[in-house]
Each structure stands twice: as structure tokens, then as C-alpha cells.
Amino acid sequence: MSELQRFLFDRMPVRGLLVRLTNDWREVLQRRPGESAFPPPVRALLGEMAAASVLMQASLRFEGALVLQVFGDGPVKLAVAEVQHDLAFRVTASITGDVAADAQLEAMLNVHGGGRCAITLDPQGRQPGQQPYQGVVPLHGDRREPLQQLSLVLEHYMLQSEQLDTRLVLAANDDIAAGLLIQRMPVSGAGNLGGERNEDRIGLDEDYKRIALLAGTLTDEELLTLPSETLLRRLFWEEPLRRFERQAGESAPRFACNCSRQRVGRMLLGLGAAEVEDIVAEQGRVEIGCEFCGLKYHFDPVDVGGLFTPASAQAPGSAAIN
């Protein structure tokens, strides 16, 4: 089953999280069978994005949605992972060209250097006029070298946006998506009161550097196959590691999509009666498929008529969107 493990290192300003998405990740892929399936490199990228976004949401404990997007000028125009505050996640991608079997991040999204990574924090119950927070970084390093791994892009993002040293290890296949996050904790307490800033400590903490080095020895195979307890024991057996209660079952990260017939109906209302009725006249009905979960919503001529009929003019007991 999918799980999330939080831990920290006693008497050190270092924390960590380990996530394993198993049955929920397989459900994501099973919803795109046959010709609708993403190419293998895209599936791996989306698995890493799902694991990474769960790790970031769990570390932030943000009351709202965290949306991780990578977009650019390659055959993959956009890849998205969205995680709610309760760790419900969903992913999708938009592909417009052929993706080579061995394609890495540059070949998928950054062919001409136009690739970007954006992280958006959209607060729950956002008020009218309130804008979500968004940070954007390019898919290249400080020397403009193309970054081939999502983990390197996100480490760069955390350093630029949060001024926090971060080590990420990500891996995914068709059975499991997993990730390990090691992070230097923000300056707090006496250091903060004394005027020390997070950026003042970048690259200076020896405990963090040692633990991040150990995390960097983790292989994809180990991350994807070892139980969390075994993995942490092998990596940090000499460190004073304190594990918190594992989040599994109902509290674990899980696949969930918040699409609905009501939302699709509102989207059709936004298109306008004339355009929607033209589609019905040509195709006999309107079919809308959710890009995240694959569920299809159908609106026949009667549904469309009810959709654009004022509620006051509808017969008792009828509903425009149901």
C-alpha cells in the first residue's frame, strides 16, 4: 500500500520524508490503457512528479492545492501533478510529438531551451481577488547547462525560492513511484532572533551535507524495492534517526480526482449555447473526457437543453446539471 514516512535527525537541523506510491500509482496508469497510455519516459516522469509533489506538500503542510508543472518546447508540452492538503494526488500530460524510448527531461521538454518548472500554491477557500503563489525556474542550472533529471530541477527551485538546501531522490516505473527528500530545516529560535537568515546557512551545515551525501548513494532499484524501514536503516544506520508514525491506509497519499459532471457543465456554460448546440448538431451529443482520470462525461440534446434553460423555466424536479 502507498505510504509516507516522516523522520528527522536528533540534535541536527535536518529532516526527511520518504514516499512510496504503489496501488494508487498503478490505478493512475490503469486508467490509460492501450493507445491512450503515455510513453514509458512520460510515465516515469509523471511518477516522479507525483512522488515529488507529495513530498513537497507533506513538508509544507499547506492548506490548499500544490500544483507542480513542467512545460516547454519539446514533444511533451506540459506535465502536471496536483496534490491536495490531504495528500490526494492526480497527474496528466499533454504530448504533441514522438517521445524517444530513452528520452530524458531535455529531450521531452527543453529541446530549444524554453523549458520551465512552476510550483503553484493555491490556498483552500481562496478569496475573490486573492492570487495563488507561484514560483518558476528554468530547466537548466546556474551555468545554463540543461538539467536531465526532475530531482535536480526541484533542488534548484528549493534553493532559489526557499533558500533551503534540499536533496531529492526520485524514481518510478509502472508498479511504484517513490521519492526521498532530505532538507536542512529553516533557521528558527535563537538563530532567527539573532538576525540569521536561511540563505546565510546555504551550503554551510556539515550535518546536512553528510546526510545528503548518504542519500545520494541511494539507487533507483533500492528506492523502488526496499521497504521504508529497511531503506532508512541501510542509509542512515550510524545517524540518530527518529521516525514518526508512518502514514498508511486512510492517511496515506492516494489517487483522487475532483472532476465532476457539475464542473463539466459549468465549463460548457462558459462556452455558450451556440457553440455547444453546434457540437450536438454535428456529433449528436457532447463528450468531455477528464485528462487526469480518464472519466468521460456525456451530454445529449436533452441534457444540453436543460443546461441552458433558466432554472425558473424548468419543470419541477428537473436539474440543469446532474
Image: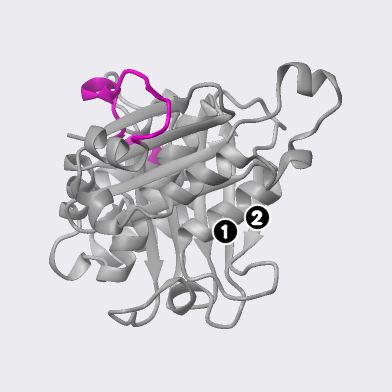
For image coordinates 56% across by 40% down, the residue present is 208
Viewed as shown, does residue 14 lie left or right of 159? left
Q: Which residue is mark 2?
A: 136
Above or below, 220 relative to 255: below
**Amino acid of disc 2:** Val
Query: Residue 244 location, x and y as percent?
Result: 36, 19
Q: Is residue 15 magenta?
A: no
Task: Name the residue tied to disc 1.
Answer: 117
Is 254 within the magenta? Answer: yes
Mark 1 Cα-neighbour bin, 10 Å: few <14, some 14–19, many ≥20: many
Bounds of the magenta segment: 237-263
Q: Is residue 262 left or right of residue 23?
A: right
Of labels 1 and 2, earlier in sequence is: 1
Task: Give the distance between the C-alpha atoms of the residues marked 1 and 2, in whole angstroms.
Answer: 6 Å
Q: Which residue occupies the foreground of this view, 23 or 140?
A: 140
Q: Nearer the viewer, residue 76 or 243?
A: 243
Closer to the camera in the image, 217 or 73: 217
Which quadrant: the N terminus?
Answer: top left
Q: Determine if residue 308 is in view.
A: no
* Image-quadrant location for residue 18: top left
Q: Residue at (46%, 57%) from the top-left corner?
A: 274
Residue 80 position in % (x across, y down): 44, 54
Mark 1 and mark 2 in contact? Answer it, CB < 8 Å. Answer: yes
Measuring from the top left, give residue 271's x and y in whole percent: 49, 52
Quadrant assignment, res 198:
top right
Q: Does residue 258 sit above or below 139 in this rendering?
A: above
Outermost residue to the right? 195
Q: Is residue 12 visible to us here?
A: yes
Q: Is residue 205 left or right of residue 87?
A: right
For this view, does 276 lie left or right of residue 315? right
